[in-house]
Amino acid sequence: MSGKKEISIAFQTDKSADEYIALAQFVNQFDFDAVSVYCDAPYHPSYGPLMLMAPHLTHARIGPAAVSPFRVHPIDIAAQTALLADVAQSGVYVGLARGAWLAEHGIEEPSAPIQGIREAVQIVKNLLAGESGGIDGKVFQISEHVRAPYPVPLEEVPVMIGTWGKKLARVAGQVADEVKIGGSANLKMAAHLQASITAGEQQAGRKPGSVGIVVGCVTVVDEDRALARQKVRQEAALYLPVVASLDPTVDADPELMARIQALVNQGQVAEAGALIPDDLLDLFAFAGNPDDLIAQTLALFEAGVSRVEYGTPHGLAPQTGIDLLGRVVVPEVRKAI
């Protein structure tokens, strides 16, 4: 395999301050390239947990995956990123995405999400570079005199854009460093977006391959393969009916998705998960024993993915799963690449 291949781990922001610190200390013993936290309402917004974790992560870059600029203003994203960069020991990144289920949490849905993301990237990059954040955009309007009044990072901060769509992937090809397909482990989905990313790179006069592809989704690894897959089915049932409809490379049975969603709505999550076929599960989750995850990860790298991110809950017990990922899966994958 050629090109840089990275492995990262991501966490939900549902912990106490002490738990974030202990988690960072535990994760730091393993060879992850990046540590991410989500920014899902109504959980803690990303930057508080990241600030708590940063002093204890000595070799992994850290960042949010991902913040909606329609929920947290780009000026605030830039300011919090600059402060995080001042504490982080191995760099930071910024993850931006439209955001899901905004209306359910009283947040107005953006009228021009793709343009809004493009403008947000410009604002964040300009402010972090010490330049004017001024913009007279369709979504954001900031006065020309606005600049960062705080210390800015010495190095350029990479930007990741989360999307399932070709239009935003093309924008990412023009302005970002990575594209993340969240909730997916599908080789074909990565290939599906690659053409749009490449077109964006070409349009912006960037070198082909400037923008990497990240895939990440719910992960459960355990020596007991059957128990791991049983657990991950329950986790995947919560989001599968949504993400399966976003993936044009998957022919998911609409009636099956409706049955799964109905059972989830009734609180029958185990019953909903039991309906997910094995082949479909493997497209939207990392699940099984360490050998299963090693094989899935290597297949994604072979398909052109540049970073694989293992998401919550990681194992039957989180610490057990993190240990297996860091102690077994990551070293074996690194040997193979």
Image: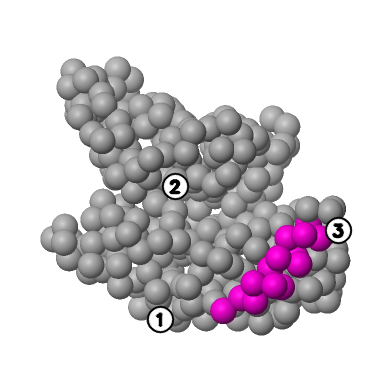
Left or right of 93, for residue 107 = right
Q: Earlier in the sequence, mark 3 or mark 2?
A: 2
The picture places residue 21, in percent across and down from the top left corner, at 67, 36
Mark 2 = which residue?
Answer: 97
Helix, strand or loop at mark 2 = strand
The picture places residue 40, in percent across and down from the top left corner, at 59, 41
The picture places residue 1, in percent across and down from the top left corner, at 40, 81
Q: Residues within 10 Å of mark 2 (few under 14, many from 20)?
A: many
Helix, strand or loop at mark 1 = loop
**Residue 30 appears anywhere in the view:** no
Q: Earlier in the sequence, mark 1 or mark 2?
A: 1
Q: Magenta segment range?
A: 251-264
Are circles 1 and 2 on residues that touch, CB within 8 Å? no
Q: Earlier in the sequence, mark 3 or mark 1?
A: 1
Are circles 3 and 1 on residues that touch, CB within 8 Å? no
Mark 1 is on which residue type?
Met
Mark 2 is on which residue type?
Ala
196 versus 292 height, above or below: above
C-alpha distance separating marks 1 and 2: 29 Å
In the rendered image, the residue lying farthest to the front is: 255
The picture places residue 237, in percent across and down from the top left corner, at 73, 62
Name which residue lies at 22% across and 63% down.
201
Would you say the magenta stretch is mainly helix, strand or loop? helix
Q: Quadrant of residue 325?
A: bottom right
Q: Residues within 10 Å of mark 1 (few under 14, many from 20)?
A: few
Mark 3 = which residue?
Answer: 268
Q: Quadrant of residue 243?
A: bottom right
Mark 1 = which residue?
Answer: 1
Mark 3 vs mark 2: give the one in front: 3
C-alpha distance separating marks 3 and 1: 43 Å
Q: Is residue 262 magenta?
A: yes
